[in-house]
Image: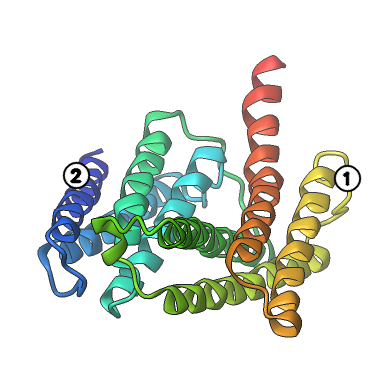
């Protein structure tokens, strides 16, 4: 439990120092104290899961553990972006989310770990990486929308100066979506290859919604390539596709593991 508390404090401390840094007009993020705190938080977050898995002997991917691992992936991606002077402001939102996800995991009773062979583990880890990457893309889309809205209204707040230029932010958004789309494609392919009866009753909603999300993200990338989609249209497509993905994975896990399990 100690490692969890230290990780949460590191995350929240990083977010607080970063917020103060951005209010002072800071743009270049590293090597500032908040970045090292964020790095420590992600390493401790990963260490907490490794300790838990070693104690049980199996990888635990119940609802809250999966939520925590997605938060870890988002925190790692954000810290990586910040180290390269890209989107440090994202950490103000991501680090508290990662701390909350980690806390929710260790405040709830663990699930019953299942022994998964390497094929199902590969599928699960690809899924978690895809969700984390596309969740970061969704946050970038929201920031892009806020930035465009502020520029149209000529309402330039201090937070706007902490973001990269609009063109760079849009480029980063589509780069992130592209990586996430590749990971989501690999997730669906490994699911078709390795998951028995992908359209079974308890998996059909997850499968259908995941495919719809994949089609939406793919349609956005094609629209960007063929028709130059950008701005509000790109934001809407990104958020709709991400909403479908959240329903596919966490919506189905919530119903199966928390609602139906408690009603039995």
Residue placed farthest to the front in the image?
Answer: 154
Q: Residue at x 61, y 72 (%)?
A: 230
Say left or right for 122 vs 201: left
Query: Mark 2 Cα within 10 Å, few/some/many (few <14, many 20+)?
Result: some
Tell me, for residue 200, which label it has, or none: 1
Q: Residue at x 83, y 51 (%)?
A: 208
Residue 216 appears at what percent x and percent y?
A: 75, 62
From the viewer's side, name the closer residue of 61 and 250.
Answer: 250
Please identify, in this view, whether the residue under mark 2 or under mark 1 is nearer the observer: 2
Residue 84 appears at what percent x and percent y?
A: 30, 80
- Between the C-alphas of marks 2 and 1, the distance is 42 Å
Say left or right for 239 vs 75: right
Say left or right for 60 vs 186: left
Badges 2 and 1: C-beta atoms under 8 Å apart? no
Query: Mark 1 Cα within 10 Å, few/some/many (few <14, many 20+)?
Result: few
Evaluate whether residue 51 shows in this view: no
Position of 84 relative to 149 (above/below)? below
Residue placed farthest to the top in the image?
Answer: 263
Position of 31 relative to 149 (above/below)? below
From the viewer's side, name the closer residue of 30 and 256.
Answer: 30
Q: Secondary structure at mark 2?
A: helix
State the residue position of label 2.
Answer: 9
Which image quarter: residue 159? Answer: bottom left
Which image quarter: residue 127? Answer: bottom right
Q: Residue at x 37, y 48 (%)?
A: 98
Q: Quadrant of the N terminus?
A: top left
């Amino acid at each position: 439990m100690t490692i969890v508390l230290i990780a949460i404090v590191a995350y929240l401390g990083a977010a607080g120092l970063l917020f103060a840094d951005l209010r002072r007009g800071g743009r270049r993020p590293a090597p500032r104290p908040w970045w090292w705190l964020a790095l420590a938080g992600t390493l401790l977050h990963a260490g907490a899961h490794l300790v838990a898995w070693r104690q049980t002997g199996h990888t635990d991917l119940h609802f809250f553990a999966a939520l925590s691992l997605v938060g870890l992936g988002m925190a790692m991606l954000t810290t990586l972006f910040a180290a390269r002077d890209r989107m440090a402001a994202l950490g103000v939102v991501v680090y508290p989310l990662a701390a909350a996800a980690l806390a929710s995991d260790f405040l709830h009773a663990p699930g019953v770990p299942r022994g998964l062979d390497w094929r199902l583990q590969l599928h699960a880890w690809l899924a978690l990486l895809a969700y984390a990457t596309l969740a970061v893309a969704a946050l970038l889309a929201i920031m892009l929308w806020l930035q465009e809205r502020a520029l149209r209204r000529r309402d330039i707040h201090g937070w706007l100066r902490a973001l990269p230029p609009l063109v760079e932010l849009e480029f980063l958004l589509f780069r992130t979506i592209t990586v996430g789309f590749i990971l989501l494609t690999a997730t669906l392919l490994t699911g078709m290859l390795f998951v028995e009866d992908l359209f079974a009753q308890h998996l059909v909603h997850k499968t259908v919604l995941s495919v719809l999300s994949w089609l939406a993200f793919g349609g956005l990338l094609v629209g960007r390539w063929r028709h130059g989609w950008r701005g509000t249209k790109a934001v809407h497509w990104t958020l709709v596709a991400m909403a479908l993905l959240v329903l596919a994975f966490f919506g189905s896990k919530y119903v199966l593991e928390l609602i139906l399990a408690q009603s039995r």
